[in-house]
Image: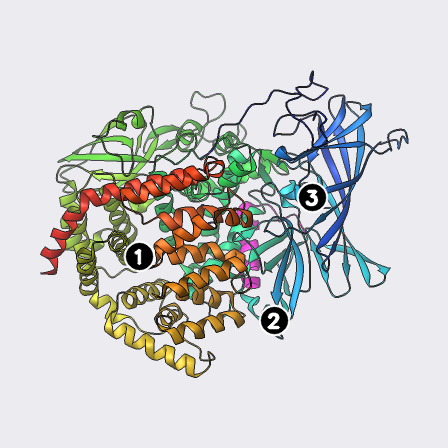
Amino acid sequence: MKFTTTFLHLLLIFATDAVYGSHNYATVATNGQPFPWAERRLPDNIFPVHYNLLIHPNLTTLKFTGSVKIEVDVTHNTNTVILHSKHLQIIKASIEDEMDDSSLGVALQVLEYPPHEQIALLSTNTLLAGKKYFVYLSYAANLSEGFHGFYKSTYHSKDGETRILASTHFEPTSARMAFPCFDEPAFKANYSITIRRGAEHIALSNMPKVKTVHLGDGLYEDHFDISVRMSTYLVAFIVCDFKSVSQMTSTGVKISVYAVPDKWNQTHYALEAAVKLLEFYEKYFNIYYPLPKQDLVAIPDFQSGAMENWGLTTYRETSLLFDPQTSSVSDKLWVTLVIGHELAHQWFGNLVTMEWWNDIWLNEGFARYMEIVSVEATYPELQADDYLLDTCFAAIGRDSMNSSRPITTTAESPTEINEMFDTVSYEKGACILHMLRNYLSKDVFQSGIVRYLRKYSYRNAKNEDLWNSMANTCTDEDFTSGEFCYSSNQAFKNRYKYGGEHLDLKTMMNTWTLQKGIPLVIVDQQNNIVRIRQERFLKGIFPTDPVWPSLQEGYLWHIPLTYITSNSRNVEKHLLETKSGVIDLRGNVSWIKFNTDMNGYYIVHYEGDGWGKIIKLLKENHTVLSHKDRANLIHNVFQLVSAGKLSLDRALDLFLYLRFETHNVPLLQGLGYLEAIFRMIEKAGNPDVAQNLKNYILKYFQDVIDKQTWSDEGSISDRRLRSEVLNLACDFDHPMCVKKANELFKEWVRSNGTLSLPTDVIMTVYSIGAKSAEGWDFLLEKYKISLSGAEKSKILSALTNTKDVDKLLRLLHLGMKEDTIRMQDLPSAIYSVAINPVGHSLAWNFVKKYWNELVEKFELGSFSIRTIIVGTTSHFSSKEDLNEVKMFFESIKEHSSQLRATQICLENIEKNIRWLERNLETLRTWLLKNIM
């Protein structure tokens, strides 16, 4: 849900189906015969129209059987049907034509080619172009042990009984693990699904159940209504014993939230949010949700955050369930955003689907952005708009590395496709959409995406289709020669006006999606003349480096700049389409601030005395700038330090204004950067500087710390600040903070964990409690029995805070065994141990030792593997660390060569090394001066 990523070039294998020419026998089936297709992508000679699917899982033997009858249209004569199948034992295969010609209704030979997860059905009779056929297959398989395909999940009831369910997760390429199919997003079809189950279970699928047939011996068969046209990865079915709550929307859609019976009482907030959000989207997109129901199901074992299966969205329990006793305000925001994300997908992704995975951002970037737009509209008190800043900061952190990638990137293998689900697709996609919406205006942006959704409903689209739709928001019939578009007979068709200048929308947006990276806008102000120029922004690589010119060559963005000045708070606009430009300001201007409210996706550097003017402004009257502008400036200066554009002491001088800051967003931004520097300095083995920095933070933010109450009072922003500040203060051994946290922990233990602690400080209290051996053991026992996913997450994080190395190692082994810590939580446990100063080498050595087992548990290109690789090395900052990591990656070259994450990891370590070389002494000197 919320990650990273390099891709191999596709290995070209020249071979064709019988229809297109002679075979190339480089591809050999498992039985030694030539396999008649050599490419990863399926041929386009056969298209599925309708699947009749029967699934019968046995939750005792953990196996399932199935049969599928696929109605197909043939576009070119052929003797073979190529489709996807993975880990399925094909029992029988046959083909019939629409006239039920019995001569074709015979068993066909099945060839398997596991490297491409494909099977070929060989027909002795030619399948004729223009005719309709029915492909029938019966098969058997084991329920998957991982998180993809049709997989097993378990939970423990209150009385200790282990219960088993079976659920699906097909995105991106795992429908083929549940039934033979044309498992590519462009092969949309309708589905009629039938599920067999025992009396103690229920079955769920994309559509409502239309009837149940009793087969005898306690076996039931549930038949579901025919689905709308959709891609294979959106098909879903579940067999479980869950309970639900339901409510109808104002337009008659039945919303239901399902969870294990003992957690039913945690489903009510999700139901309320889902109803509100679905109703919002129907109005915003001006397109009714096309299904009669929408189920939201909390699955005990779930790798990602959630999945948008049409009509049957599935979630990790922490992403759907809300327990008022243990869930914090941040948990509430998270649940609301995730629901908003998955419901946005019902339009972006489900109704209109990207043609291929290279454009997955059309699904994920839109869903990430719309989750913020929708929650801001329906739950303004959650202040989701501020969350957008963190979203874009995360995108910039990834995109300013040379190992980044364009938003639209070639991806062919399952590993490459998995790695597309990263920060670039999600966060950067959301940020460029926000930039687009900001300058087109909210109304024009909305009308453009509605046009896109209407035009491509139940179809597939590409990157350029979006821009063409956005650029055609008025037609010849309703054309007005206003600010936004022109009729087709005019020279500037499909161009917008921005700051008095015409924009070619498609050309402009291609500079953001077809090239990687983020621009740096360099500003040189001389009185009322502002000279601006752009270059590619890179962290850890400097203009004096030999590679610098080659890394800058060919990069040019069309940047919609915004700015305010000392003379006017009105937002001015300027389009920078060339390497440099000049802005002539009106009157005498003492300062200028670009990227107003951080509505654009670019970094700004002020040359000459530009930063001096801004530092002076913040010191004298920081409220002249919005809280978003102030957070943006804090972010900018630290990015510029990493790029060698600004000295660290200059950046820290800007921070001095924070003693006057009253808004929580810039405060958290400033604290976050200081803490990040501390963590790196601490792990790099510089105790004197680390201690001085800790003392400085505690001294400088003393007033902020003292103002915090141990309660759940205040706005969302106030409560988030409370959680972060108290957690940091206690971690830094602030005496009063530690004392209060210990008191609350002891009270909680005396109540045997029944005392309701303020949810905003639970994490802090648990973390302090876990520092003692007795507290750690008590928390581990509570973890085992807790029914709250939010509470378990907080306990696990606290358990990783111990300074006892043996206990940290025990935690990691518990995660590998999966009996106490679920496999889904192992990556975050490894990451949390790695953050701990005494655990960071331990975590890395654990990953090296158990690498093969970890890859077996999690798919190679998955977010989980990226979290493990990048998370355990993120604070490495020595050449010895770098060499050790390189050696390990070389030892697992078969895996590491397929991953962009390894490049990210190495580049990040190199960046840390250079940061310390350039800034350690500067930091030491600055701290000594300012502590005194």
Residue of label 3: 228
Q: Tell me which amino acid carries mark 1.
A: Val
Separation of residues labelled 2 and 3 (CA atoms): 34 Å
> How far across and down, in percent of the image, does residue 223 sit?
78, 53
Check disc 2 and report its element: helix, strand or loop. Answer: helix
Q: Left or right of 320: which side holds 253?
A: right
Q: Say whether marks 2 and 3 touch (CB < 8 Å).
A: no
Which residues make up the magenta segment? 270-291
Protein image colouring:
rainbow
Q: State the count of labels.
A: 3
Is residue 440 visible from the viewing direction of this image?
no
Q: Say whether marks 1 and 3 touch (CB < 8 Å).
A: no
Q: Tell me which amino acid carries mark 2.
A: Asp
Between disc 2 and disc 1, whose residue precedes? 2
What label does residue 665 carry, if any?
1
Q: Is residue 658 above or below residue 126?
A: below
Q: Is residue 393 above or below residue 693?
A: above
Name the residue located 69 percent from the left edge and 43 percent from the top edge.
Answer: 228
Crowd tier of the residue under label 3, counting other residues whose Cα lies within 10 Å: few below 14, some 14–19, many 20 or above: some
Q: Tell me which amino acid carries mark 3.
A: Val
> How far across and down, in percent of the image, does residue 80 sit?
75, 26
Tell me which secondary structure the magenta stretch mostly adopts.
helix
Between disc 1 and disc 3, whose residue precedes? 3
> How far across and down, in percent of the image, does residue 72 sit?
76, 32
Q: Is residue 271 one of those drawn in magenta?
A: yes
